[in-house]
Each structure stands twice: as C-alpha cells, then as structure tokens.
Amino acid sequence: ILTILGNSAVLATAVKRSSLLKPPELLTVNLAVADIGMALSMYPLAIASAWNHAWLGGDASCVYYALMGFLFGVCSMMTLCAMAVIRFLVTNSSKSNSTKITKNTVCILIAFIWFYSLLWAILPLVGWGYYGPEPFGISCTIAWSKFHNSSNGFSFILSMFLLCTVLPALTIIACYLGIAWKVHKAYQEIQNIDRLPNAAKLEKKLTLVS
C-alpha cells in the first residue's frame, strides 16, 4: 500500500507540474511507473499465496507473475543506471562545454529501457531460460535451479546476471564515485581560494564564475 501511495504521489506531482519538469526528472517518473506496475501486477497474488502457504494460481499465472517481476525489476535497475549516468555527465561537464540533456533524449532512453526490459522478460517464453516456482512455493521467478541442470538455463542466467545486474550496478557505482570525486575536487578548490590573499581570492572567484 505504501509503495502504491508513495509512487502515486510522485506521479500526481509530476502531472501537476509537467510543464516545469526537467528532462532528467522523467526518469524518476519512469521509476515510479515501474514500481507501481510491480506492486499492482504482483502483490495481490503474492499476498494471497503467502496467506494460503502455497501458490494459488496454475502454471499460466506463475509465468505471468515471474514475467512481471522480471520486466519491472530490470526496468527499475536500468532506470537507476540511466539516472546515475546522466547525473555523472551533468556534474562533470564544464560550463563552457555543458552536457545538454533534452526531453527527446530522455524519452528515447526510456523507450530503450522498456524495450530492453521486455526483451529479457520474453526470452524465457521463446525458449531461452525458464520461469518457475521459487523454493518456498508461494511465488514464481526465474528458474534458478536450471543454472546447474541445463546448459540453456546456465547461459540465460549467467547472461542475465551480467547484463541486467552486474553491469548496471558497476556503472552506478562508477558514476557516483565520479560525482563524489568531482565534489571533492570542487571542495578543495574552495579551500584553496580561502587561503589566497584578498586580491588573488577575488580574481580566482571571478575566474571560476566566468
């Protein structure tokens, strides 16, 4: 309930001030959409099955549940990755050569994120990888047990793990480390300015501003 209410508030705010939204903020809206989609498509089945101590649906609903979880999960991860990259580019661009992020660019990026997520989500349906019940039997996801039992499952899980988890996670870490380093260097610049004589300090500040 909190997930739905919180993300609905984000969407309502975005709609209310849509004309004032900056392009990168569209990614925050996309993240809220993915979170709400996951909550609405998965939580009712998950709660009912947990209450029943067993999966309530059949094979079709199991595949549906797993597909929705995979789709919205990858979408959220890739959206967070895109947000980190854009923040890194904006933070590390100089005033004379600033990185301009337009709404069209972000919309294309969001469309790619959904296409990428949907592609991975439907791959088990066309023969690469499998969906199945989780060990406790009250929800469904990727059939992790196939990692050891099938070359098909092994290749899919390994590829998915690298391209949908490891690579985005490393990109996020690298981008935020780069941002932290940029902030650290800016702080050092300010400290150095404070140590200069008044005339030199004023000249340095004017140089930075220009």
Image: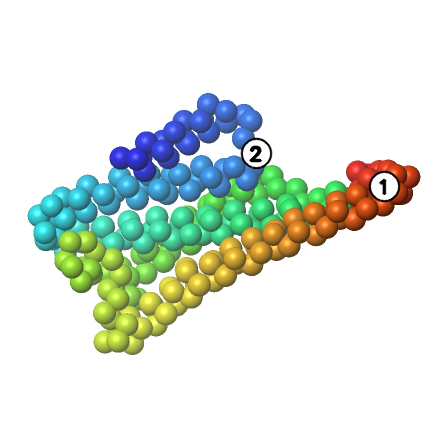
Label 2: state its secondary structure.
Answer: loop
Residue sitting at x 79%, y 48%? 192
**Amino acid at dot 1:** Lys
Residue sitting at x 42%, y 32%? 10
| Nearer to us: label 1 or label 2 | 1
Image quadrant assignment for residue 132: bottom left
Which is more toward the observer, 180 or 56? 180
Q: CA distance from mark 1 to mark 2?
A: 34 Å
Write down the residue under mark 2. 22
Screen quadrant of the N terminus: top left
| Left/right of residue 113 with respect to residue 22 in the rendered view | left
Label 1: state its secondary structure.
Answer: helix
Q: Residues within 10 Å of mark 1 (few under 14, many from 20)?
A: some
Mark sitting earlier along the chain (1/2): 2
**Amino acid at dot 2:** Lys
The circle on residue 136 is: none
| Left/right of residue 202 with respect to residue 153 in the rendered view | right
Image height of 21 relative to 139, above or below: above
Q: Could you say where residue 68 lies in the image, as x and y percent from the top left?
A: 28, 49
Screen quadrant of the C terminus: top right
Which is more toward the observer, 103 or 157? 157
